[in-house]
Image: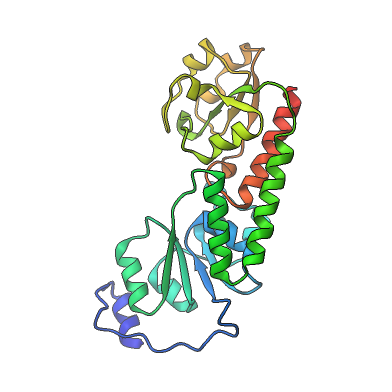
Amino acid sequence: MRRCAGALLAGALLLSGCSAPASAPPANPAQPTIVSLNPCTDAILAEVAAPGQLLAISHYSKDPRSTSMEARVAQGFAATGGTVEEVLALAPDVVVAGSFIPPATRAALENLGIRVVTFGMAGTVAESEAQVRELAALAGDAAAGERLVGRIEAALKAAGSAGGPPVSAVLWQPGGIVPGEAALVSELLERTGFSSLSMMRGMAQADFLALEQVAADPPQVLLVAGSEAGQRHPVLDKLPQVRREHFDTQLLYCGGPTIIRAAHRLAAIRQSVS
């Protein structure tokens, strides 16, 4: 173990010649200890893991600019920067990471006997619910996953009950870009009573929406999730037919419990427009 750890600390990641010693079995083998390196899996595991089972979340979830968790929830967990040394010190049974985990990091963890499971970004509600179920099963509590899925479906059903024709909306994200058809937040807009004006214009994922375009063809609702100069321009105040609403960047990218918060926010906006 010392020889392997020393190699890691020296920055050598070619660990195939080192073998990790057998670790002590967890108190409950059906509920492995977990370290999460991805902000989206952080939020889900915080809901479905047993107390003490989630040893650490990613440092992204401690940063207001990148988290999808509420601050009070994130404060209840330790965090790592995702280095092999930090993870090794926690001695988890499983590491949960995003699909873009560096190959060298993954190889080093697996060579040390730590299982690594990766998840991509969910592009639909169905994909997110499948991830919830998979993470809950991984944590050894499938029922917790079903409870969270039930809450997601209940929130979406309630948020979509306003009735009436869809309200045209543009979601203006950080950098002045808009979401595309394959983005989870686009489905949330549709299911809560909005129609995406940017998609109706033929704009795709991460296309830039200029202030001039907004002014020339404004939506009924402009959801501002950024702080670019154009998104704060005084000309927007001269569009009385447009309702401008703040949309928290924490609600943009992740699924799981984030869907519930996003649905509540969109429902409140939709109701105010009605």
Depth order, front residue of 154/105 = 154
Residue 116 position within the rendered picture, expressed as x and y whole percent measured from the top left: 41, 69
Depth order, front residue of 105/194 = 194
Depth order, front residue of 226/136 = 136
Q: Quadrant of the N terminus?
A: bottom left
For the question of whether residue 76 can be seen, the reply is no
In the image, is 268 to the left or to the right of 190?
A: right
Depth order, front residue of 105/12 = 105
| Residue 245 versus residue 144 in the image, above or below | above
Residue sitting at x 24%, y 74%: 14
For the question of whether residue 100 can be seen, the reply is yes
Residue sitting at x 43%, y 76%: 88
Residue 140 falls in which quadrant of the image?
bottom right
Q: Quadrant of the C terminus?
A: top right
In the image, is 95 to the left or to the right of 270?
A: left
- What coloring was used for the rendering? rainbow
| Residue 270 versus residue 69 in the image, above or below | above
| Residue 19 versus residue 232 in the image, above or below | below
Residue 162 position within the rendered picture, expressed as x and y whole percent measured from the top left: 75, 29
Residue 52 position within the rendered picture, expressed as x and y whole percent measured from the top left: 63, 74
Residue sitting at x 45%, y 72%: 87
Residue 169 position within the rendered picture, expressed as x and y whole percent measured from the top left: 59, 24
In the image, is 246 to the left or to the right of 272?
A: left
| Residue 183 versus residue 202 in the image, above or below | below
Residue 102 falls in which quadrant of the image?
bottom left
Residue sitting at x 70%, y 28%: 270
In the image, is 10 to the left or to the right of 141?
A: left
